[in-house]
Structure formats: structure tokens, C-alpha cells
Image (tube, coloured by chain):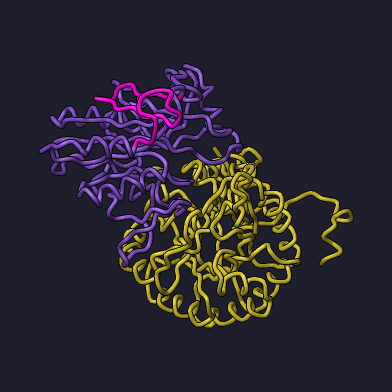
Chain colours: A yellow, B purple
């Protein structure tokens, strides 16, 4: 079998392959060892870490929808200090790359969390959650304001030489505007997309199915939207894109690469099939070999499309 | 955490699926490692369909173990349970388990009072067998909407209640056990309960009033079943930590450690 290059680099950090697990769908990386070989992954995006622990929202927090799920977890997490003390030592022993996902309600908090992690070994980079739809303060407000988005990227860039990835929300008119803003502030990559705001109602009780009424929609239901957002962002920026949104199998993952993503993150499917991400790692390599490639990079943005007919053109 | 058995994911061959009461099925499948490791109160998370609809796994209490076979009980309430109810012998099921914390059997009691509401009977055949093995006396209080939903196989000393009076005591299972406890007895009781939240709340009150330890098995809306999605919180009375997770910290909880709410 011919060898194919699966690895790629961001800001000098080499990742073994292009399949990652999305923040909030894989815990802190230590919960799944009996179900999935984490060392086979390109990297793990940790559950969002805030300065102090967060309890999260009251039940109900999740609701199943057609080929998808709504969640309103509210960034429940153990806080960055407990992460460093209790989770990181075990994670350092894995060979996969750990990307710390950070959530905060002020620029200062983002900076504090990142600065603390900056002193720790075993963190390959940061993914900044500016787009959680489920917390009242901060969160989505940051992610829907291009100036705030740029300010966060700019502040954090000054604090670290590790890869800085900004996770963007699709709940805006032109996501590419936000990608451009963080690119110009020195971000190394963007993650596209976080969940879409959604809602479900129980018609018997006439109550919303989530305690917070609306929540974030994920799963295969959102894949076509995510793909179009990746395509839009890929046209607008040169930095790498982590494609996220309803990826269930290797074909889904390759669609994202073709649309312009450098790597992908598997999210909701980790709940359905803990081995989904490692199956995609295998499948992507096999696909590249079958296509006689020498490097998976050849797939990135390799969409064959007649650009004249793309409706995106009017936006860009 | 008393349970240290790591969950496994496996394709399991369906042995049998039979309707045992109105819209209630008993489904058995082969999973030797689970059969050897599972403890009463633990559950499995089953992928209903290989397609993306319905998307999420469905959690079920392990109801019985016989040799290599695992038995669950399910009630048709939506598309997922309908698909499961139509599984035929020889088909394959993607099963994740054992999950969650088991019931605690070693507490100081001599008589177990099992209280089940509707399909809340599911975990109790396995619990009953384990209790009898360690020499505990078992009394079972089972309530159903009507006689059509009755499914009380492999339970001991059954006291039956139905909402419509079509069989057994006409009323709630809580009233039934209250009446039972009126009788003078020197027995040391522990309640094990599973069923609707309202029933569990009433038992929590009863436990407080009579100073009887109640261990409850909860249901929760969950996706992963292993503590990652954080979808199934239950409010704790302890002020230090606001929520526990039904899937990982439960589904069994002492009534004195949680704050049940109707919306759960």
C-alpha cells in the first residue's frame, strides 16, 4: 500500500491527521479510552474551559430533532484550574494533540484562562469559543460582533505563540466577514461552524423542549449549512479552516475538505458512535490512496465547480 | 464510584423480541461480557438504527441476565422504540454498556420494598434475583395504568395497583405501600424505586416521614450515556456541586441526595 501523507501543520505544530473531535463532544479526552483509541486522532478539542467552574443550565438540556439534536448545556465545565490539576496529566501521556477550548464572558477572562494554560506543557494550541448560543452573558454577543471578535483575536494573539483557532458562529449574516477579521488579527485558523440556534416544542404541554427555550442545533441535519459556510469562508481567507457540522462518516469529511476545510471535527456523532472519528481517520487515508494521492492536502479546496453559478459571489 | 467496569460497544445478535403487554416488549440479545459484568440498576445505550434517523441512542435498564443473554423491556413511545420493537431474532444491535452506577445492596436492611410505576419495573427482575441471592426478603409494589400494561414476571411477592382499578388495588402504588407500612413490623426496610417523577417525589416524602432509605432509579434525556454530553443533569441537594449526571453519577440516587422536580 502506497504511503499517503496525512499530517499537516499549523503554526509549526504538526498534527498526525485531519480528523479532530469537536469541543463538548469528547469531554476532556479522558472519558472515552475504553471505547475509542484517542491516539489515532489528529487532535482533541477539549470541553470549553472557563476561569471558574460552571454548573450549566437546568434540565432539560437536550432534545432530539430530525437527524439532529438541540442542546443547551450552558458550558458546564470543571474550570481551567481543575482541568490543569486533574485532567491534563493523563492527557499528556497520550500521543494525540490537545487543543484547549476556551469560553469566557469577558476579554479579560479569555486572556486569564489562556495565560494560565500558556504555562502548561501538553497543550498544542487553543480554540476560542466566541460563539456558544447557550450562555446569556458574553458568548454569542462576542461572536456576532465583528469588532469584538477581532478584539478577542488581537488580545489573545499577543499572549501566545501556540496555534490560535477561533470558532465562529453561523448565526450571523456573513460568516466570512468574521473570518477575515480574525485572520487580519493574526489568528492561525478558524473553526466553522458552531451550532445553529434552534428550537423544539412539545405540543402536548405547549412547552419548549429545552429549559432555555432555544438551543444549539447540531448533527447531520446541519451538514449542508455547515458545508456552505466552510465554502464561503474558504473563498474569503487564506488561513486553515476546521470544518464542523454533522460529519458522520468519511464521505461527509471529504466533502468538507473539498469545500475548503484543511481538517474536520467530528461532533455529535461521537455520542452516537464513539468510534465514528477513528473510522473517519481510516477512511480518509484509504480514500486518498484509492485516489492515488501523495498528500491528503490535495483534497483541500479541490471542489470542481463552475464558479459563475455560485450565489456566494454576490456576497464576496 | 462503586462501578469500575468500563463500558464496551458491541454488535449483539438479537435472540428474541416479544410483546408481553400492551405496547410493551421484552427484547433479548447476546452480550457475554456485559452479562458477566452488569449489576442491578445499570443500563445499556442502544443505537436503534444504522441511519441518522432517529439519531441518538436509547437508554434501557438491564432487566435480566440469563447465561450470555441480556434482556431489556421497552414500551413503544416514539419512532425509536417502535423500530426496536420490530427487531427480529438474528438481527444485529449496536449496544453500549454496562453504564451507570448500580443499586446498593449492602446497606443495612433485611426487607427490600421494590416500587415500580409502569415500565419502571424494568430494572427489578435483575435486582430481585440479586437481593434473593444475598438472603434479603423482597416485597414488590407495582402500579400500572390498567391491567393491559401489567408486566410483573420474575418479581417477588407482588402487590398490584392500577389507576383504573382493572386489576389489584384501585389507586396509586404509593398509597399501596403506605397501607403496607401501617402494619406493625420489626423489619428493617429499604425502598428501591423506578417510575414517573411524581411517584418518586411521593416516595421521597414517604421515606422522610418513615425514616426509610429510598434508592431511586431516574430517567434522563441523554445522548452519550457516558457523561460526556452533559445532557442529563439532576439537581443535587448538596450546595457545593449543583448537578449530577443521571447517566454517570446515576441512574441510581438516594432520595436524600437529589432535588427532584416535576420537569425532570
A295 vs A133, nearest the viewer: A133
**Which residue is at 44% across, 46% downward?**
B220
Residue A212 in the image, given as x and y percentages of width and height: 56, 60
Residue B88 in the image, given as x and y percentages of width and height: 50, 18
Q: Is residue A276 above or below residue A244?
A: above
B37 vs A242, nearest the viewer: B37
A314 left or right of B204 in image: right
Q: From the image, give the main secondary structure of the stretch colored magenta.
A: loop
Residue A82 in the image, given as x and y percentages of width and height: 34, 68
How many numbered circles does the render carry?
Answer: 0
Whether the magenta-drawn stretch holds residue B190 is answered as no
**Which residue is at 57% across, 34% downward?**
B78
**Which residue is at 63% across, 71% downward?**
A143
**First to last magenta residue range:** B149-173
A43 left or right of B30 in image: right
Residue B161 seen anywhere in this rendered image of the structure: yes
Residue B188 in the image, given as x and y percentages of width and height: 14, 40
**Which residue is at 48% across, 79% downward?**
A109
Where, by quadrant of the figure, is residue A35 drawn? top left
Amino acid at each position: 500500500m502506497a504511503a499517503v501523507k496525512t499530517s499537516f501543520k499549523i503554526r509549526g505544530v504538526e498534527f498526525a491527521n485531519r480528523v479532530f473531535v469537536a469541543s463538548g463532544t469528547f469531554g476532556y479526552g479522558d472519558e472515552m479510552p475504553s471505547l475509542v483509541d484517542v491516539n489515532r486522532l489528529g487532535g482533541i478539542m477539549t470541553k470549553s474551559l472557563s476561569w471558574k467552574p460552571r454548573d450549566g443550565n437546568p434540565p432539560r438540556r437536550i432534545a432530539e430533532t430530525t437527524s439532529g439534536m438541540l442542546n443547551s448545556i450552558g458550558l458546564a465545565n470543571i474550570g481551567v484550574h481543575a482541568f490543569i490539576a486533574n485532567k491534563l496529566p493523563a492527557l499528556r501521556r497520550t500521543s494525540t494533540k490537545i487543543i484547549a477550548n476556551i469560553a469566557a464572558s469577558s476579554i479579560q477572562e479569555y486572556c486569564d484562562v489562556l495565560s494560565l494554560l500558556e504555562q502548561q506543557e501538553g497543550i498544542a494550541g487553543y480554540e476560542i469559543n466566541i460563539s456558544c448560543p447557550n450562555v446569556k452573558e458574553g458568548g454569542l454577543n462576542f461572536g456576532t460582533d465583528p469588532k469584538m471578535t477581532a478584539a478577542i483575536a488581537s488580545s489573545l494573539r499577543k499572549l501566545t505563540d501556540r496555534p490560535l483557532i477561533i470558532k465562529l458562529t453561523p448565526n450571523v449574516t456573513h460568516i466570512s466577514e468574521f473570518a477575515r477579521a480574525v485572520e487580519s488579527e493574526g489568528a492561525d485558523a478558524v473553526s466553522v461552524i458552531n451550532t445553529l440556534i434552534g428550537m423544539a416544542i412539545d405540543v402536548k404541554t405547549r412547552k419548549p423542549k429545552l429549559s432555555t427555550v432555544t438551543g444549539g442545533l447540531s448533527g447531520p441535519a446541519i451538514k449542508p449549512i455547515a458545508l456552505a459556510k466552510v465554502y464561503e469562508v474558504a473563498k474569503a481567507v487564506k488561513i486553515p479552516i476546521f470544518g464542523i457540522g454533522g460529519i458522520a462518516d468519511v464521505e461527509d469529511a471529504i466533502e468538507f475538505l473539498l469545500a475548503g476545510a484543511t481538517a474536520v471535527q467530528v461532533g455529535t456523532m461521537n455520542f452516537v458512535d464513539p468510534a465514528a472519528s477513528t473510522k473517519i481517520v481510516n477512511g480518509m487515508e484509504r480514500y486518498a490512496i484509492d485516489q492515488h494521492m501523495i498528500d491528503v492536502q490535495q483534497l483541500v479546496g479541490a471542489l470542481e465547480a463552475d464558479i459563475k453559478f455560485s450565489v456566494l459571489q454576490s456576497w464576496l | 464510584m462503586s462501578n469500575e467496569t468500563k463500558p464496551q460497544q458491541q454488535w449483539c445478535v438479537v435472540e428474541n423480541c416479544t410483546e408481553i403487554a400492551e405496547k410493551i416488549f421484552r427484547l433479548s440479545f447476546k452480550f457475554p461480557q456485559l452479562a458477566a459484568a452488569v449489576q442491578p440498576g445499570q443500563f445499556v445505550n442502544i443505537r436503534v438504527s444504522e441511519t441518522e434517523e432517529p439519531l441518538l441512542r436509547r437508554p434501557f435498564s438491564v432487566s435480566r441476565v440469563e447465561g450470555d443473554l441480556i434482556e431489556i423491556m421497552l414500551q413503544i413511545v416514539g419512532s425509536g422504540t417502535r423500530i426496536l420493537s420490530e427487531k427480529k431474532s438474528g438481527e444485529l444491535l449496536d449496544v453500549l454498556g454496562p453504564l451507570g452506577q448500580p443499586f446498593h445492596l449492602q446497606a443495612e436492611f433485611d426487607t427490600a420494598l421494590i416500587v415500580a410505576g409502569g415500565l419502571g419495573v424494568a430494572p427489578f427482575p435483575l435486582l430481585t434475583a440479586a437481593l434473593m441471592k444475598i438472603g434479603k426478603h423482597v416485597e414488590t409494589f407495582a402500579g400500572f395504568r390498567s391491567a393491559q400494561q401489567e408486566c410483573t414476571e420474575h418479581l417477588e411477592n407482588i402487590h398490584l395497583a392500577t389507576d383504573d382499578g382493572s386489576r389489584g388495588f384501585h389507586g396509586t402504588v404509593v398509597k399501596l405501600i403506605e397501607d403496607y407500612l401501617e402494619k406493625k413490623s420489626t423489619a428493617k426496610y429499604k425502598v428501591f424505586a423506578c417510575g414517573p417523577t411524581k411517584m418518586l417525589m411521593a416516595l421521597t416524602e414517604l421515606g422522610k416521614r418513615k425514616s426509610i432509605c429510598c434508592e431511586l432509579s431516574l430517567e434522563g434525556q441523554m445522548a452519550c450515556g457516558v457523561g460526556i454530553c452533559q445532557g442529563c443533569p439532576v439537581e443535587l441537594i448538596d450546595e457545593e456541586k449543583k448537578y449530577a449526571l443521571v447517566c454517570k453519577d446515576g441512574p441510581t440516587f438516594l432520595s436524600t441526595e437529589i432535588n427532584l422536580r416535576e420537569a425532570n
